[in-house]
Image (cartoon, grey):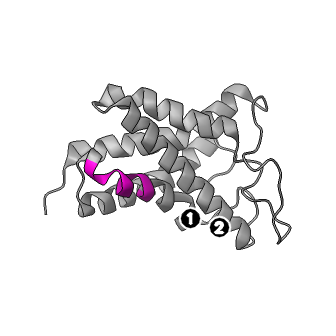
Amino acid sequence: MIFESTRIAQALILICVANGSPIISRKLFGERYAQPVDAGLLLFDQRPVFGASKTWRGLLAAIICTAAVAPMIGLSALLGAKFGALSISADLLASFTKRRLGFAPSSRARLLDVFPEALLPTLVLQSALGLDKWDVVLTGLVFFVFETSVSPLLFRWHIRNRPY
């Protein structure tokens, strides 16, 4: 089992960009362009589909920024855009699941907050990224450790609203 460190590093960079760009765009734009993806719709359980923190601004930021960064690390912009779209889709699915389980918007559910947005794009784009199944697993684990370690710092630096 030989891990492809360059390919794993590329995937980790894209994951970080896809997950970080909505946070940075919120800091840059404040409440401007912050229309919720779910338009405030409540489902049968009287809970939001995703929640107000999942915005079109964040969705577009994830896709555009990963598309912009991908060529800088040797990947195509189209692959970057696909990666960003898959990562943010996984984030939306995680938010949908958390709402159905009764978690408040922006509440902490570590496994749902980290793994889907790392694993979905790396699994779907595994071949295009040149990753094998162990690379995908390692990428998810490294992102989990990184996110767990860096998130409190981002909170302390007033980049994140919560310390997770």
Residue 123 sits inside the magenta stretch: yes
Residue 157 showing in the rendered view: no
**Image quadrant assignment for residue 112:** bottom right
Q: What residue is at 23 percent from the left and 48 percent from the top? A: 130
Secondary structure state at the residue bearing disc 2: helix
Task: From this view, report whether residue 121 is shown above or below residue 133.
Answer: above
Of labels 1 and 2, earlier in sequence is: 2
In this figure, which residue is indicated by the disc labeled 2?
97
In this figure, which residue is indicated by the disc labeled 1?
112
The picture places residue 45, in percent across and down from the top left corner, at 82, 72
In terms of depth relative to the viewer, which is nearer, 87 or 127?
A: 127
Magenta residues, dominant SS class: helix
Q: Nearer the viewer, mark 1 or mark 2?
A: 2
Residue 155 showing in the rendered view: yes
Q: What residue is at 50 percent from the left and 49 percent from the top? A: 87
Disc 1 residue crowd, few under 14, some 14–19, many 20+, Cα 10 Å: some
In terms of depth relative to the viewer, which is nearer, 120 or 102?
A: 120
The picture places residue 80, in percent across and down from the top left corner, at 41, 36
Do tag 1 and tag 2 residues touch (Cβ < 8 Å)?
Answer: yes
Q: Quadrant of the C terminus?
A: bottom right
Residue 121 sits inside the magenta stretch: yes
Amino acid type, residue under disc 2 in the picture: Thr
Range covered by the magenta-colored residues = 119-127
Amino acid type, residue under disc 1 in the picture: Leu
In terms of depth relative to the viewer, which is nearer, 120 or 154?
A: 120
The picture places residue 21, in percent across and down from the top left corner, at 56, 36
Q: What residue is at 53 percent from the left and 44 percent from the top? A: 19
Q: Is residue 155 left or right of residue 99?
A: left
Q: Quadrant of the N terminus?
A: bottom left
Q: What residue is at 61 percent from the left and 33 percent from the top? A: 24
Q: Is residue 89 left or right of residue 105?
A: left
C-alpha span from label 1 to label 2: 8 Å
